[in-house]
Amino acid sequence: MLNIVLFGPPGAGKGTQSDKLINKYSLVHLSTGDILRSEVAAGTQLGLEAKKLMDAGNLVPDEIVIGMISSKLDANPQAKGFIFDGFPRTAKQAEALDKLLEGKKTSISMMLALEVDNDELIKRLLNRGKLSGRSDDADESIIQNRITEYNNKTAPLKDYYTHQGKFRAIMGVGTVDEIFTSLCSNIDLNN
Ligand code: AMP
């Protein structure tokens, strides 16, 4: 199986690149942000609780997102592989993911990290907020909080995957197609 963690701060282009990668490599896209937004839209209890945290730019508790990923893995037994987008975001989530995949006799193949500087991220997110209507993209202080959450809790996962020899940095600035080409070259080289 080809199991990729697509990594990077909010606004790095993970969603855009995931859509292209799942088509090329026939993978299943698992985005915890998308799953949470569909719970919010459906008005479930989980969605109501998550919305407050998401609107403030804070992370949702580990147990919730780990449970969501676990049921999506169970729901796709025939998958050729997965793209994990926006998950894992904490050390606890990364450890849980390794265990879940081990239980399915597979593992993470690589972590591909899209690198983009802070000013560019804020510019992209404010622009996306105008187009998508996402409330957490509309306000610069919430965006800043999401980036702080990323720097404190998520960025350290670079070390976790480096220890496993799975970390690959990709320049996340350029055209969508240029970035996609770098991602594919890395995948093809390591697969
Ligand atoms: P995203 O679409 O990945 O930017 O996620 C939007 C929001 O959903 C984040 O700011 C968090 O509040 C929440 N979220 C998404 N994925 C996770 C995760 N793996 N762990 C905790 N919170 C998450």
Image (cartoon, rainbow, N blue to C red):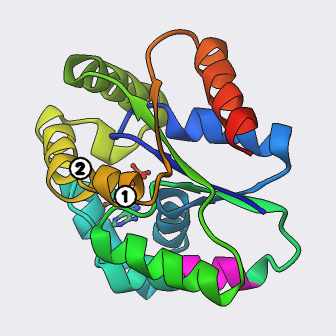
Lateral position of residue 73 relative to residue 170, left or right: right
The answer to whether residue 60 is seen in the rendering is no
Amino acid on which disc 2 is placed: Tyr
Horizontal and vertical percent position of residue 113: 44, 38
The residue sitting at 30% across, 25% down in the picture is 121
Horizontal and vertical percent position of residue 98: 51, 76
> Cβ–Cβ below 8 Å for labels 2 and 1?
no
Quadrant where the N terminus sits is bottom right
* Residue 150: numbered disc: 2
Horizontal and vertical percent position of residue 106: 69, 75
The answer to whether residue 119 is seen in the rendering is yes
The residue sitting at 21% across, 39% down in the picture is 143
Where does the magenta region start and end?
Answer: 68-74
Horizontal and vertical percent position of residue 67: 49, 86
Lateral position of residue 44 relative to residue 91, left or right: right
As for residue 109 lying within the magenta part, the answer is no
According to the image, label 1 marks what residue?
Answer: 163
Q: Quadrant of residue 52?
A: bottom left
